[in-house]
Image (cartoon, helix red, strand yellow):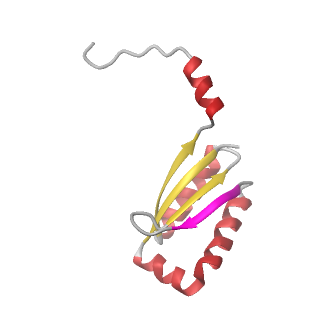
């Protein structure tokens, strides 16, 4: 399954929700959303600094990740970014593919 790194920052409204529900309540909500689309939460951590939450999730396909991202962003309580994660084997495969590319101006 494709794996994604999700980094999120709470809006003031989202922070109020976290204070009300606690971390366990938010984890349960995340698990429900991810498993509802056939995915799995590998790890979820709260942090401080630029990001408030960092997750690693598996989804059956990138469209499922996009669906979750759109729903979460539409809710207005979080600003998120998702980064596809690739295995070493996937990068090895990518290095073996021929790509015809011409840099601008060359």
Q: How many numbered callouts? A: 0
Residue segment shown in magenta: 40-46
Residue 36 placement, left or right of 83: right
**What x and y, as percent, mark residue 19?**
52, 84
Quadrant occupied by the C terminus:
top left
- The one of 10 and 88 positioned closer to us in this rendering: 88
Quadrant of the drawing holding the N terminus? top right
> What residue is drawn where x is 67% and y is 44%?
61
Q: Is residue 101 left or right of residue 24?
A: left
Depth check: give the residue in front, 72 or 11: 11
Q: Position of residue 38 (x, y in %)?
A: 74, 54
Residue 43 x %, y %: 64, 60
* Rendered view: 33 above or below 1: below
> Toward which corner of the image does residue 27 lie, by quadrant?
bottom right
Task: Find out whether residue 18 is within the magenta segment.
Answer: no
Residue 65 rendering spot, x and y as whole percentages: 60, 51
Q: Residue at x 59, y 82 (%)?
A: 22
Seen as rendered, the residue at the extreme bottom is 20
Prevailing secondary structure of the magenta residues: strand
- Identify the residue at image location x=44%, y=69%: 48
Residue at 69% across / 66% down in the picture?
Answer: 31
Left or right position of 82 against 12: right
């Amino acid at each position: 399954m494709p794996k994604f790194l999700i980094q999120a920052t709470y809006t003031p409204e989202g922070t109020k929700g976290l204070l009300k529900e606690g971390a366990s309540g938010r984890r349960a909500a995340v698990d429900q959303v991810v498993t509802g689309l056939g995915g799995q939460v590998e790890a979820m951590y709260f942090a401080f600094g630029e990001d408030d939450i960092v997750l690693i999730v598996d989804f059956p396909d990138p469209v499922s990740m996009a669906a979750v991202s759109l729903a979460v962003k539409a809710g207005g309580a979080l600003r998120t970014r998702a980064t596809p994660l690739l295995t070493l084997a996937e990068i090895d495969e990518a290095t073996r593919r021929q790509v015809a590319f011409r840099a601008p101006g060359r």
